[in-house]
Image (cartoon, rainbow, N blue to C red):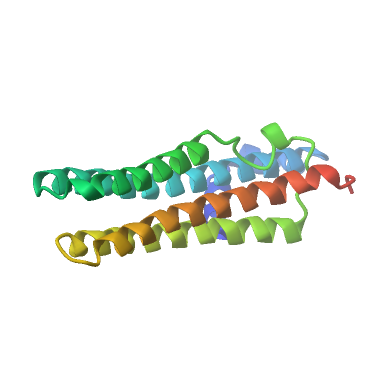
């Protein structure tokens, strides 16, 4: 995850670096950079899951055209879960400020947040493989299990995102240090 933060901070210009030397201003710049890194991460996660959602929609069309109507509802259930997840990621407050301005994220909590972020990207890879499995299972007895797996990965993604939010919100209950 430091790559995202490094990507944002590497674009700082000379004036920003100079202003970072002003007492109190460096914390502001760091918060802004974390916000930008968080936005970049959220965009990456939502884009990856958006592609998964599009692939699911294509499979639904394929199922209808092949007469496998009995599986369309199950695929729609998966599509809805992924769409809701994507919308939550896209519309959540960015960064470790904004909604969370009063929240000071400590280093151990930041590590936990980055672990959840990595888990989300890993789940995107797993979901892509699950979509591959669904596509390969069309017309076989393995299709229902493949669809269930795809739906369970959507639930895991929502859970990981919820846990990430809980880490941030838990900091509101902690006194500022």
Name the residue at 71% across, 47% down.
Answer: 168
> Residue at the front extreme?
70
Locate the N terminus and report the quarter of the image it occupies. bottom right
Q: Is residue 112 visible?
A: yes
Q: Is residue 117 left or right of residue 65?
A: right
Location of residue 80 in the rendering, given as x and y in whole percent from the top left corner: 38, 40
Looking at the image, which residue is at 22% across and 48% down? 70
Give whichever of 86, 148 is nearer the camera.
Answer: 148
Query: At 20% from the left edge and 64% from the top edge, which residue is drawn?
Result: 137
Q: Looking at the picture, tell me which residue is in the foreground, 70 or 1.
A: 70
Q: Is residue 5 visible?
A: no
Q: Residue at x 73, y 38 (%)?
A: 28
Q: Nearer the viewer, residue 146 or 174?
A: 146
Tell me if residue 71 comes above or below residue 83 in the rendering: below
Q: Position of residue 86 (x, y in %)?
A: 44, 41
Number of numbered discs present?
0
Q: Position of residue 24 (x, y in %)?
A: 81, 39
Residue 18's image quarter? top right
* Relative height, residue 8 to residue 115 (above, below): above
- Which is more toward the observer, 90 or 83? 83
* Residue 79 coordinates in the image, percent (x, y): 34, 44
Tell me: 13 left or right of 122: right
């Amino acid at each position: 995850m430091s790559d995202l933060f490094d990507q944002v901070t590497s674009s700082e210009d000379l004036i920003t670096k100079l202003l970072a030397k002003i007492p109190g201003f460096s914390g502001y710049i760091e918060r802004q950079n974390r916000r930008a890194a968080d936005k970049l991460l959220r965009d990456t996660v939502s884009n990856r899951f958006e592609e998964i959602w599009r692939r699911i929609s294509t499979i639904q069309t394929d199922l209808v055209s092949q007469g496998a109507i009995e599986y369309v509802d199950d695929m729609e259930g998966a599509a809805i879960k992924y769409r809701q997840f994507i919308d939550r990621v896209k519309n959540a407050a960015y960064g470790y400020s904004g909604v969370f301005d009063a929240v000071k994220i400590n280093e151990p909590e930041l590590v936990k947040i980055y672990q959840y972020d990595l888990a989300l990207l890993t789940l995107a890879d797993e979901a892509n493989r699950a979509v591959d499995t669904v596509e390969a299972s069309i017309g076989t007895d393995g299709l229902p299990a493949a669809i269930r797996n795809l739906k369970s990965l959507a639930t895991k993604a929502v859970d990981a995102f919820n846990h990430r939010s809980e880490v941030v919100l838990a900091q509101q209950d902690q006194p500022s240090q």
